[in-house]
Amino acid sequence: MTQKEKLGIVVAGHGSRDPDAVREFEALVELVRARAPDDVVTHGYLEFSSPTIAEAVQANLAAGTRQVAVVPGVLLAARHAKNDMPAEVQAMARDYPDIDFHFGAPMNLHPQLLQLAQERIVEAEATSPLTLRRSDTCLVLVGRGTTDPDANGEVSKLARMLEEGMGFGGVYVCYSGTATPLVADGLRAAARMGYQRLVVLPFFLFDGVLVKRIYAAADDLREREPGLEVLKAGYFGVHSHVADVIIERAREAVAGRAAMNCSLCKYRVQIVGFEQQVGEPQRAHHLAVRGLLAQVSATASATAPETAATPSYAPYEPHPIEAESFRIIAAGRDWSGFPASHLTVLQRLVHTSGDFGAVDDMYFSPGAVESGILALLRCKRVLTDVTMVQTGLKRQLLEQLGIDTWCGVHDRETHLMSAAEGITRSAAGVRRGWQKFGNDVVLAIGDAPTAIAEAARLIRDHGWRPQLVIGLPVGFVGTRETKDELRRCLQVPRITNSGTRGGSPWAASVVNGLMIDALNQLAGYEAR
Protein backbone atom coordinates (compact mmCIF):
# COMPACT_ATOMS: atom_id res chain seq x y z
CA MET A 1 0.00 0.00 0.00
CA THR A 2 1.08 3.58 -0.54
CA GLN A 3 1.36 5.94 2.40
CA LYS A 4 -2.04 7.35 1.48
CA GLU A 5 -3.62 3.90 1.31
CA LYS A 6 -2.06 2.48 4.43
CA LEU A 7 -4.22 0.19 6.53
CA GLY A 8 -5.20 0.98 10.08
CA ILE A 9 -5.15 -1.94 12.52
CA VAL A 10 -6.81 -1.50 15.90
CA VAL A 11 -5.99 -4.35 18.26
CA ALA A 12 -8.93 -4.55 20.65
CA GLY A 13 -7.95 -6.05 24.00
CA HIS A 14 -10.14 -7.14 26.85
CA GLY A 15 -8.45 -5.00 29.49
CA SER A 16 -7.54 -6.01 33.02
CA ARG A 17 -7.17 -4.77 36.55
CA ASP A 18 -3.82 -6.60 36.61
CA PRO A 19 -0.97 -4.36 35.40
CA ASP A 20 1.03 -7.43 34.30
CA ALA A 21 -1.67 -8.30 31.78
CA VAL A 22 -1.78 -4.74 30.45
CA ARG A 23 2.00 -4.57 30.06
CA GLU A 24 2.10 -7.84 28.14
CA PHE A 25 -0.75 -6.82 25.84
CA GLU A 26 1.00 -3.55 25.01
CA ALA A 27 4.25 -5.43 24.36
CA LEU A 28 2.35 -7.64 21.91
CA VAL A 29 0.99 -4.54 20.16
CA GLU A 30 4.55 -3.29 19.77
CA LEU A 31 5.45 -6.64 18.19
CA VAL A 32 2.49 -6.36 15.80
CA ARG A 33 3.65 -2.86 14.90
CA ALA A 34 7.17 -4.14 14.21
CA ARG A 35 5.91 -6.99 12.03
CA ALA A 36 3.49 -4.77 10.08
CA PRO A 37 5.64 -1.66 9.50
CA ASP A 38 3.55 -0.38 6.58
CA ASP A 39 0.36 -0.24 8.64
CA VAL A 40 -0.83 2.08 11.41
CA VAL A 41 -1.27 -0.04 14.53
CA THR A 42 -3.03 1.27 17.63
CA HIS A 43 -4.67 -0.49 20.53
CA GLY A 44 -7.61 -0.03 22.88
CA TYR A 45 -9.37 -1.88 25.65
CA LEU A 46 -12.92 -3.04 26.14
CA GLU A 47 -12.92 -2.93 29.93
CA PHE A 48 -11.05 -1.33 32.84
CA SER A 49 -7.91 -0.16 31.02
CA SER A 50 -7.20 2.81 28.76
CA PRO A 51 -7.14 3.88 25.98
CA THR A 52 -10.62 2.70 25.03
CA ILE A 53 -11.30 1.17 21.64
CA ALA A 54 -12.93 4.40 20.50
CA GLU A 55 -9.80 6.34 21.47
CA ALA A 56 -7.65 3.81 19.61
CA VAL A 57 -9.74 4.35 16.47
CA GLN A 58 -9.41 8.12 16.81
CA ALA A 59 -5.63 7.80 17.11
CA ASN A 60 -5.57 5.60 14.02
CA LEU A 61 -7.58 8.05 11.96
CA ALA A 62 -5.39 10.92 13.15
CA ALA A 63 -2.47 9.10 11.51
CA GLY A 64 -4.24 9.40 8.15
CA THR A 65 -5.90 6.01 7.65
CA ARG A 66 -9.18 5.73 5.77
CA GLN A 67 -9.60 1.99 6.16
CA VAL A 68 -9.57 0.46 9.65
CA ALA A 69 -9.60 -3.21 10.70
CA VAL A 70 -10.60 -3.76 14.32
CA VAL A 71 -9.19 -7.13 15.40
CA PRO A 72 -10.27 -8.78 18.68
CA GLY A 73 -7.18 -9.46 20.74
CA VAL A 74 -8.94 -12.44 22.28
CA LEU A 75 -8.62 -16.15 21.66
CA LEU A 76 -12.22 -17.24 21.16
CA ALA A 77 -15.52 -15.83 19.96
CA ALA A 78 -17.81 -15.44 22.94
CA ARG A 79 -19.84 -12.47 24.19
CA HIS A 80 -17.04 -9.91 23.95
CA ALA A 81 -16.19 -10.77 20.33
CA LYS A 82 -19.81 -11.34 19.28
CA ASN A 83 -21.53 -8.44 21.04
CA ASP A 84 -19.36 -5.91 22.85
CA MET A 85 -16.61 -5.31 20.30
CA PRO A 86 -18.98 -5.26 17.28
CA ALA A 87 -21.06 -2.69 19.17
CA GLU A 88 -17.96 -0.50 19.45
CA VAL A 89 -17.31 -0.86 15.72
CA GLN A 90 -20.91 -0.01 14.87
CA ALA A 91 -20.68 3.13 16.99
CA MET A 92 -17.48 4.14 15.20
CA ALA A 93 -19.08 3.54 11.81
CA ARG A 94 -21.91 5.90 12.76
CA ASP A 95 -19.49 8.54 14.02
CA TYR A 96 -17.21 8.32 10.97
CA PRO A 97 -19.42 7.52 7.95
CA ASP A 98 -16.59 8.23 5.45
CA ILE A 99 -14.28 5.59 6.93
CA ASP A 100 -14.30 1.93 5.91
CA PHE A 101 -14.46 -0.17 9.06
CA HIS A 102 -13.84 -3.92 9.10
CA PHE A 103 -14.21 -6.30 12.01
CA GLY A 104 -11.82 -9.22 12.22
CA ALA A 105 -12.32 -12.69 13.59
CA PRO A 106 -10.83 -13.70 16.95
CA MET A 107 -7.67 -15.78 16.87
CA ASN A 108 -9.49 -19.10 17.38
CA LEU A 109 -7.60 -22.37 16.86
CA HIS A 110 -5.11 -21.10 14.33
CA PRO A 111 -2.35 -23.60 13.36
CA GLN A 112 0.30 -21.19 14.65
CA LEU A 113 -1.38 -21.12 18.05
CA LEU A 114 -1.40 -24.91 18.11
CA GLN A 115 2.34 -24.79 17.48
CA LEU A 116 2.73 -22.27 20.28
CA ALA A 117 0.80 -24.54 22.66
CA GLN A 118 3.18 -27.32 21.67
CA GLU A 119 6.17 -25.10 22.47
CA ARG A 120 4.80 -24.21 25.90
CA ILE A 121 4.22 -27.87 26.74
CA VAL A 122 7.72 -28.93 25.64
CA GLU A 123 9.24 -26.07 27.64
CA ALA A 124 7.35 -27.23 30.74
CA GLU A 125 8.48 -30.84 30.27
CA ALA A 126 12.09 -29.63 30.01
CA THR A 127 11.93 -28.27 33.56
CA SER A 128 11.51 -31.78 35.00
CA PRO A 129 14.41 -34.05 35.96
CA LEU A 130 12.26 -37.07 35.09
CA THR A 131 11.98 -38.69 31.69
CA LEU A 132 8.43 -39.94 31.13
CA ARG A 133 6.52 -41.15 28.15
CA ARG A 134 3.71 -38.87 27.08
CA SER A 135 1.36 -41.84 27.49
CA ASP A 136 2.03 -41.54 31.24
CA THR A 137 1.08 -37.86 31.23
CA CYS A 138 -2.31 -36.16 31.45
CA LEU A 139 -2.64 -32.72 29.88
CA VAL A 140 -4.87 -30.40 31.91
CA LEU A 141 -6.03 -27.60 29.60
CA VAL A 142 -7.55 -24.62 31.41
CA GLY A 143 -9.79 -22.28 29.43
CA ARG A 144 -11.22 -18.93 30.42
CA GLY A 145 -14.80 -20.21 30.55
CA THR A 146 -17.72 -18.31 29.03
CA THR A 147 -21.50 -18.42 28.78
CA ASP A 148 -21.14 -19.46 25.13
CA PRO A 149 -21.06 -23.26 24.60
CA ASP A 150 -19.42 -22.88 21.20
CA ALA A 151 -16.44 -21.03 22.67
CA ASN A 152 -16.15 -23.54 25.51
CA GLY A 153 -16.32 -26.32 22.95
CA GLU A 154 -13.31 -24.88 21.13
CA VAL A 155 -11.25 -25.45 24.29
CA SER A 156 -12.24 -29.11 24.24
CA LYS A 157 -11.36 -29.28 20.55
CA LEU A 158 -7.91 -27.87 21.23
CA ALA A 159 -7.42 -30.38 24.03
CA ARG A 160 -8.29 -33.26 21.73
CA MET A 161 -5.95 -32.02 19.01
CA LEU A 162 -3.07 -31.71 21.46
CA GLU A 163 -3.84 -35.08 23.01
CA GLU A 164 -3.76 -36.89 19.68
CA GLY A 165 -1.04 -34.76 18.09
CA MET A 166 1.40 -35.01 20.99
CA GLY A 167 0.50 -38.47 22.28
CA PHE A 168 -0.75 -37.70 25.77
CA GLY A 169 -2.23 -40.58 27.72
CA GLY A 170 -5.22 -38.44 28.65
CA VAL A 171 -6.56 -34.93 28.73
CA TYR A 172 -8.79 -33.06 31.13
CA VAL A 173 -10.48 -29.73 30.38
CA CYS A 174 -11.47 -27.26 33.07
CA TYR A 175 -12.10 -23.52 33.30
CA SER A 176 -11.08 -20.57 35.42
CA GLY A 177 -14.62 -19.21 35.67
CA THR A 178 -18.23 -19.24 34.42
CA ALA A 179 -18.04 -22.75 32.91
CA THR A 180 -17.47 -25.98 34.83
CA PRO A 181 -15.53 -27.83 36.06
CA LEU A 182 -13.52 -25.09 37.71
CA VAL A 183 -9.75 -25.27 37.98
CA ALA A 184 -9.44 -26.77 41.46
CA ASP A 185 -12.12 -29.39 40.75
CA GLY A 186 -10.53 -30.23 37.40
CA LEU A 187 -7.08 -30.68 38.90
CA ARG A 188 -8.42 -32.94 41.64
CA ALA A 189 -10.25 -35.05 39.06
CA ALA A 190 -7.20 -35.28 36.81
CA ALA A 191 -5.03 -36.31 39.78
CA ARG A 192 -7.32 -39.29 40.36
CA MET A 193 -6.86 -40.60 36.82
CA GLY A 194 -3.67 -42.43 37.72
CA TYR A 195 -1.07 -40.66 35.56
CA GLN A 196 2.47 -40.01 36.80
CA ARG A 197 2.53 -36.42 35.54
CA LEU A 198 0.09 -33.59 34.94
CA VAL A 199 0.97 -30.75 32.58
CA VAL A 200 -1.22 -27.71 33.33
CA LEU A 201 -1.56 -25.47 30.27
CA PRO A 202 -3.49 -22.17 30.60
CA PHE A 203 -5.20 -21.40 27.29
CA PHE A 204 -4.66 -17.68 27.84
CA LEU A 205 -2.91 -14.91 25.96
CA PHE A 206 -1.56 -12.98 28.93
CA ASP A 207 -0.78 -13.08 32.62
CA GLY A 208 -3.42 -11.76 34.97
CA VAL A 209 -5.64 -12.58 37.90
CA LEU A 210 -6.99 -15.78 36.35
CA VAL A 211 -3.63 -17.16 35.25
CA LYS A 212 -2.19 -16.51 38.70
CA ARG A 213 -5.18 -18.37 40.14
CA ILE A 214 -4.50 -21.35 37.84
CA TYR A 215 -0.86 -21.56 38.88
CA ALA A 216 -1.79 -21.24 42.56
CA ALA A 217 -4.21 -24.16 42.20
CA ALA A 218 -1.47 -26.23 40.54
CA ASP A 219 0.88 -25.41 43.43
CA ASP A 220 -1.78 -26.46 45.94
CA LEU A 221 -2.25 -29.78 44.15
CA ARG A 222 1.50 -30.39 44.11
CA GLU A 223 1.62 -29.93 47.89
CA ARG A 224 -1.35 -32.25 48.46
CA GLU A 225 -0.09 -34.94 46.07
CA PRO A 226 3.71 -35.20 46.56
CA GLY A 227 3.84 -38.44 44.55
CA LEU A 228 2.37 -36.73 41.46
CA GLU A 229 4.51 -34.51 39.26
CA VAL A 230 2.65 -31.30 38.38
CA LEU A 231 4.24 -29.11 35.69
CA LYS A 232 3.06 -25.59 34.92
CA ALA A 233 3.23 -24.68 31.24
CA GLY A 234 3.39 -21.06 30.18
CA TYR A 235 0.49 -19.13 28.74
CA PHE A 236 0.88 -17.89 25.14
CA GLY A 237 2.23 -14.42 25.97
CA VAL A 238 4.13 -12.05 23.67
CA HIS A 239 5.16 -14.23 20.73
CA SER A 240 5.62 -13.76 17.00
CA HIS A 241 2.99 -16.43 16.31
CA VAL A 242 0.35 -14.43 18.18
CA ALA A 243 1.35 -11.19 16.44
CA ASP A 244 1.22 -12.86 13.02
CA VAL A 245 -2.25 -14.27 13.67
CA ILE A 246 -3.52 -10.77 14.57
CA ILE A 247 -2.05 -9.33 11.36
CA GLU A 248 -3.57 -12.18 9.34
CA ARG A 249 -6.99 -11.55 10.90
CA ALA A 250 -6.74 -7.87 9.93
CA ARG A 251 -5.90 -8.75 6.33
CA GLU A 252 -8.78 -11.25 6.20
CA ALA A 253 -11.20 -8.64 7.52
CA VAL A 254 -10.31 -6.13 4.81
CA ALA A 255 -10.54 -8.83 2.15
CA GLY A 256 -13.99 -9.88 3.39
CA ARG A 257 -12.76 -13.30 4.50
CA ALA A 258 -13.20 -12.99 8.26
CA ALA A 259 -14.47 -16.45 9.16
CA MET A 260 -16.68 -16.46 12.24
CA ASN A 261 -18.06 -19.53 13.98
CA CYS A 262 -21.63 -18.86 12.89
CA SER A 263 -22.76 -22.45 12.33
CA LEU A 264 -22.94 -23.08 16.09
CA CYS A 265 -23.42 -19.50 17.27
CA LYS A 266 -26.18 -19.36 19.88
CA TYR A 267 -27.27 -15.93 18.59
CA ARG A 268 -27.88 -17.25 15.04
CA VAL A 269 -29.13 -20.83 15.36
CA GLN A 270 -30.95 -22.78 18.04
CA ILE A 271 -28.34 -24.44 20.21
CA VAL A 272 -29.52 -27.01 22.72
CA GLY A 273 -30.11 -25.25 26.04
CA PHE A 274 -29.69 -21.74 24.61
CA GLU A 275 -32.71 -21.55 22.31
CA GLN A 276 -33.97 -18.29 23.82
CA GLN A 277 -30.88 -16.35 22.76
CA VAL A 278 -31.44 -16.71 19.01
CA GLY A 279 -31.73 -13.23 17.54
CA GLU A 280 -30.87 -11.54 20.82
CA PRO A 281 -30.15 -7.85 20.16
CA GLN A 282 -26.47 -7.02 19.80
CA ARG A 283 -26.04 -4.96 22.95
CA ALA A 284 -22.82 -3.97 24.66
CA HIS A 285 -22.44 -5.30 28.22
CA HIS A 286 -19.15 -3.62 29.08
CA LEU A 287 -20.05 0.06 29.17
CA ALA A 288 -20.09 0.34 32.96
CA VAL A 289 -16.40 -0.66 33.18
CA ARG A 290 -15.07 0.88 29.95
CA GLY A 291 -11.98 2.90 30.87
CA LEU A 292 -12.82 2.38 34.52
CA LEU A 293 -9.28 2.36 35.90
CA ALA A 294 -8.49 5.71 34.31
CA GLN A 295 -11.66 7.16 35.85
CA VAL A 296 -10.66 5.76 39.23
CA SER A 297 -7.17 7.20 38.90
CA ALA A 298 -8.55 10.61 38.01
CA THR A 299 -10.63 10.72 41.19
CA ALA A 300 -8.14 8.95 43.47
CA SER A 301 -7.38 12.10 45.46
CA ALA A 302 -10.97 12.34 46.59
CA THR A 303 -12.21 8.76 46.46
CA ALA A 304 -10.62 5.40 47.20
CA PRO A 305 -10.41 3.15 44.11
CA GLU A 306 -12.68 0.55 45.65
CA THR A 307 -15.36 3.15 46.25
CA ALA A 308 -15.06 4.65 42.79
CA ALA A 309 -15.41 1.22 41.19
CA THR A 310 -18.60 0.45 43.08
CA PRO A 311 -21.82 0.86 41.05
CA SER A 312 -24.00 3.75 42.10
CA TYR A 313 -27.66 3.08 42.91
CA ALA A 314 -30.44 5.62 43.01
CA PRO A 315 -33.76 4.95 44.76
CA TYR A 316 -36.67 3.77 42.63
CA GLU A 317 -38.45 6.71 41.00
CA PRO A 318 -42.02 5.90 39.90
CA HIS A 319 -43.76 7.67 37.04
CA PRO A 320 -45.93 10.54 38.37
CA ILE A 321 -49.14 8.63 37.58
CA GLU A 322 -47.76 5.54 39.29
CA ALA A 323 -46.75 7.62 42.30
CA GLU A 324 -50.24 9.12 42.55
CA SER A 325 -51.77 5.62 42.33
CA PHE A 326 -49.69 4.43 45.24
CA ARG A 327 -50.55 7.53 47.26
CA ILE A 328 -54.20 6.62 46.81
CA ILE A 329 -53.51 2.96 47.68
CA ALA A 330 -51.60 3.92 50.84
CA ALA A 331 -54.54 6.06 51.97
CA GLY A 332 -57.23 3.65 50.80
CA ARG A 333 -57.20 1.23 53.73
CA ASP A 334 -55.64 0.60 57.12
CA TRP A 335 -52.21 -1.00 56.57
CA SER A 336 -51.13 -1.05 60.20
CA GLY A 337 -51.93 -4.74 60.58
CA PHE A 338 -49.34 -5.78 57.98
CA PRO A 339 -45.58 -6.02 58.57
CA ALA A 340 -43.75 -3.02 57.17
CA SER A 341 -41.49 -5.30 55.11
CA HIS A 342 -44.54 -6.64 53.22
CA LEU A 343 -46.07 -3.30 52.24
CA THR A 344 -44.28 -2.72 48.93
CA VAL A 345 -45.35 -6.14 47.64
CA LEU A 346 -48.89 -5.91 49.02
CA GLN A 347 -49.56 -2.43 47.67
CA ARG A 348 -48.26 -3.44 44.24
CA LEU A 349 -50.71 -6.36 44.27
CA VAL A 350 -53.53 -3.91 44.97
CA HIS A 351 -52.27 -1.74 42.11
CA THR A 352 -52.19 -4.74 39.77
CA SER A 353 -55.55 -6.21 40.74
CA GLY A 354 -57.44 -2.99 41.38
CA ASP A 355 -58.78 -4.64 44.52
CA PHE A 356 -57.91 -3.68 48.09
CA GLY A 357 -59.16 -7.07 49.24
CA ALA A 358 -56.56 -8.94 47.18
CA VAL A 359 -54.06 -8.71 50.04
CA ASP A 360 -56.31 -10.32 52.64
CA ASP A 361 -55.67 -13.82 51.29
CA MET A 362 -51.91 -13.47 50.96
CA TYR A 363 -49.50 -15.73 52.83
CA PHE A 364 -45.83 -14.98 53.51
CA SER A 365 -43.67 -17.56 55.22
CA PRO A 366 -41.45 -16.07 57.95
CA GLY A 367 -38.59 -14.10 56.38
CA ALA A 368 -39.84 -14.66 52.81
CA VAL A 369 -39.46 -11.03 51.75
CA GLU A 370 -35.99 -10.71 53.24
CA SER A 371 -34.92 -14.00 51.65
CA GLY A 372 -36.28 -12.90 48.29
CA ILE A 373 -34.43 -9.59 48.34
CA LEU A 374 -31.14 -11.25 49.28
CA ALA A 375 -31.65 -13.90 46.59
CA LEU A 376 -32.26 -11.30 43.89
CA LEU A 377 -29.08 -9.48 44.85
CA ARG A 378 -26.95 -12.61 45.23
CA CYS A 379 -28.29 -15.15 42.70
CA LYS A 380 -29.57 -12.58 40.19
CA ARG A 381 -31.90 -15.00 38.42
CA VAL A 382 -35.69 -15.28 38.26
CA LEU A 383 -37.24 -18.48 36.91
CA THR A 384 -40.83 -18.16 35.69
CA ASP A 385 -43.44 -20.70 34.64
CA VAL A 386 -44.75 -18.69 31.66
CA THR A 387 -43.52 -15.81 29.55
CA MET A 388 -46.32 -13.55 30.80
CA VAL A 389 -44.64 -13.44 34.20
CA GLN A 390 -41.29 -12.84 32.55
CA THR A 391 -42.55 -9.94 30.42
CA GLY A 392 -44.34 -8.41 33.41
CA LEU A 393 -41.05 -7.78 35.20
CA LYS A 394 -39.85 -4.20 35.07
CA ARG A 395 -37.00 -4.11 32.56
CA GLN A 396 -35.37 -1.05 34.13
CA LEU A 397 -35.14 -2.77 37.51
CA LEU A 398 -33.75 -5.97 36.01
CA GLU A 399 -31.04 -4.00 34.24
CA GLN A 400 -30.18 -1.83 37.24
CA LEU A 401 -29.78 -4.88 39.48
CA GLY A 402 -28.22 -7.11 36.81
CA ILE A 403 -30.89 -9.81 37.16
CA ASP A 404 -31.45 -12.44 34.47
CA THR A 405 -34.79 -14.10 33.79
CA TRP A 406 -35.46 -17.53 32.33
CA CYS A 407 -38.61 -19.27 31.17
CA GLY A 408 -38.42 -22.62 29.43
CA VAL A 409 -42.06 -23.15 28.54
CA HIS A 410 -41.51 -22.68 24.79
CA ASP A 411 -38.13 -24.38 24.45
CA ARG A 412 -37.70 -27.45 22.32
CA GLU A 413 -36.36 -29.55 25.20
CA THR A 414 -39.36 -28.57 27.32
CA HIS A 415 -41.68 -29.83 24.57
CA LEU A 416 -39.71 -33.07 24.36
CA MET A 417 -39.74 -33.55 28.13
CA SER A 418 -43.44 -32.74 28.35
CA ALA A 419 -44.28 -35.38 25.74
CA ALA A 420 -41.88 -38.01 27.09
CA GLU A 421 -42.81 -37.57 30.76
CA GLY A 422 -46.52 -36.90 30.28
CA ILE A 423 -46.42 -33.59 32.15
CA THR A 424 -47.46 -30.07 31.18
CA ARG A 425 -44.99 -27.75 29.51
CA SER A 426 -45.07 -25.43 32.51
CA ALA A 427 -44.14 -28.31 34.81
CA ALA A 428 -41.42 -29.41 32.40
CA GLY A 429 -40.07 -25.86 32.30
CA VAL A 430 -39.82 -25.80 36.10
CA ARG A 431 -38.03 -29.16 36.06
CA ARG A 432 -35.57 -27.87 33.46
CA GLY A 433 -34.95 -24.80 35.60
CA TRP A 434 -34.11 -27.08 38.52
CA GLN A 435 -31.70 -29.02 36.31
CA LYS A 436 -30.04 -25.92 34.81
CA PHE A 437 -29.73 -23.61 37.80
CA GLY A 438 -30.05 -25.65 40.97
CA ASN A 439 -30.95 -23.71 44.11
CA ASP A 440 -29.79 -20.25 43.04
CA VAL A 441 -33.11 -18.95 41.72
CA VAL A 442 -36.23 -17.09 42.71
CA LEU A 443 -39.13 -19.11 41.27
CA ALA A 444 -42.19 -17.08 40.24
CA ILE A 445 -45.31 -19.03 39.18
CA GLY A 446 -48.30 -17.06 37.98
CA ASP A 447 -50.23 -19.30 35.61
CA ALA A 448 -49.92 -23.06 36.03
CA PRO A 449 -50.95 -25.03 39.14
CA THR A 450 -49.02 -27.96 37.62
CA ALA A 451 -45.84 -25.85 37.89
CA ILE A 452 -46.43 -25.48 41.63
CA ALA A 453 -47.09 -29.21 41.94
CA GLU A 454 -43.82 -30.02 40.14
CA ALA A 455 -41.87 -27.52 42.23
CA ALA A 456 -43.32 -28.99 45.43
CA ARG A 457 -42.41 -32.51 44.27
CA LEU A 458 -38.83 -31.49 43.54
CA ILE A 459 -38.58 -29.73 46.90
CA ARG A 460 -40.06 -32.68 48.79
CA ASP A 461 -38.49 -35.63 46.97
CA HIS A 462 -35.29 -34.29 45.42
CA GLY A 463 -33.99 -31.70 47.86
CA TRP A 464 -34.52 -28.64 45.64
CA ARG A 465 -34.14 -25.46 47.63
CA PRO A 466 -34.97 -22.39 45.53
CA GLN A 467 -34.30 -19.21 47.46
CA LEU A 468 -37.94 -18.14 47.24
CA VAL A 469 -41.05 -19.65 45.64
CA ILE A 470 -43.83 -17.30 44.58
CA GLY A 471 -46.96 -19.27 43.71
CA LEU A 472 -49.95 -17.20 42.57
CA PRO A 473 -51.71 -18.98 39.68
CA VAL A 474 -55.31 -18.15 38.83
CA GLY A 475 -58.03 -20.66 38.03
CA PHE A 476 -60.42 -23.32 39.28
CA VAL A 477 -58.69 -26.62 38.46
CA GLY A 478 -56.10 -27.61 41.01
CA THR A 479 -55.32 -24.04 41.97
CA ARG A 480 -56.46 -24.11 45.61
CA GLU A 481 -54.91 -27.52 46.20
CA THR A 482 -51.47 -26.73 44.82
CA LYS A 483 -51.30 -23.43 46.69
CA ASP A 484 -52.09 -25.32 49.90
CA GLU A 485 -49.35 -27.82 48.98
CA LEU A 486 -46.85 -24.99 48.48
CA ARG A 487 -47.82 -23.51 51.81
CA ARG A 488 -46.87 -26.83 53.44
CA CYS A 489 -43.37 -26.79 51.85
CA LEU A 490 -41.62 -25.77 55.05
CA GLN A 491 -38.16 -26.29 53.48
CA VAL A 492 -38.25 -23.07 51.38
CA PRO A 493 -39.36 -19.44 51.78
CA ARG A 494 -42.65 -18.92 49.93
CA ILE A 495 -45.27 -16.35 49.05
CA THR A 496 -48.72 -17.50 47.96
CA ASN A 497 -52.40 -16.98 48.67
CA SER A 498 -55.51 -19.01 49.22
CA GLY A 499 -58.34 -19.39 46.78
CA THR A 500 -58.59 -19.05 43.03
CA ARG A 501 -57.38 -15.50 42.52
CA GLY A 502 -53.96 -14.63 41.13
CA GLY A 503 -52.33 -14.71 37.73
CA SER A 504 -49.13 -13.82 35.93
CA PRO A 505 -49.44 -10.06 36.66
CA TRP A 506 -49.71 -10.90 40.36
CA ALA A 507 -46.55 -13.01 40.36
CA ALA A 508 -44.69 -10.35 38.37
CA SER A 509 -45.87 -7.67 40.80
CA VAL A 510 -44.42 -9.56 43.75
CA VAL A 511 -41.03 -9.79 42.05
CA ASN A 512 -41.21 -6.12 41.04
CA GLY A 513 -41.95 -5.16 44.63
CA LEU A 514 -38.97 -7.16 45.86
CA MET A 515 -36.72 -5.56 43.25
CA ILE A 516 -37.87 -2.08 44.27
CA ASP A 517 -37.08 -2.82 47.90
CA ALA A 518 -33.72 -4.30 46.89
CA LEU A 519 -32.79 -1.23 44.88
CA ASN A 520 -33.90 1.14 47.63
CA GLN A 521 -31.85 -0.80 50.16
CA LEU A 522 -28.74 -0.52 47.98
CA ALA A 523 -29.33 3.20 47.52
CA GLY A 524 -29.78 3.56 51.27
CA TYR A 525 -26.48 1.82 51.98
CA GLU A 526 -24.65 4.15 49.58
CA ALA A 527 -26.23 7.22 51.18
CA ARG A 528 -24.88 6.36 54.62
Image (cartoon, rainbow, N blue to C red):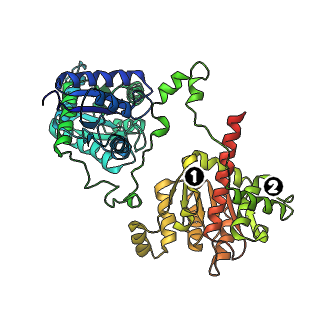
Question: Going 61% across and 37% down the picture, which residue do you hit?
Answer: 312
Residue type, label 2: Pro
**For residue 493, what is the image quadrant?**
bottom right
Viewer-side residue, 431 vs 103: 103
Q: Which residue corresponds to mark 1?
A: 396
From the top left corner, tell me how far across and down residue 505 is, in percent: 62, 67
Name the residue at 76% across, 66% down: 359
Q: Secondary structure at mark 1?
A: helix
Q: Position of residue 447 (x, y in %)?
A: 58, 72
Residue for point 69% across, 62% down: 495
| Residue wearing tag 2 | 339
Compared with 357, 326 (above or below) is above
Q: CA distance from mark 1 to mark 2?
A: 27 Å
Q: Quadrant of the C terminus?
A: top right
| Residue closer to the observer: 404 or 450 | 404
Percent position of residue 12, x then y: 32, 34
Element class at badge 2: loop
Residue at 45% of width from left, 27% of height from top? 17
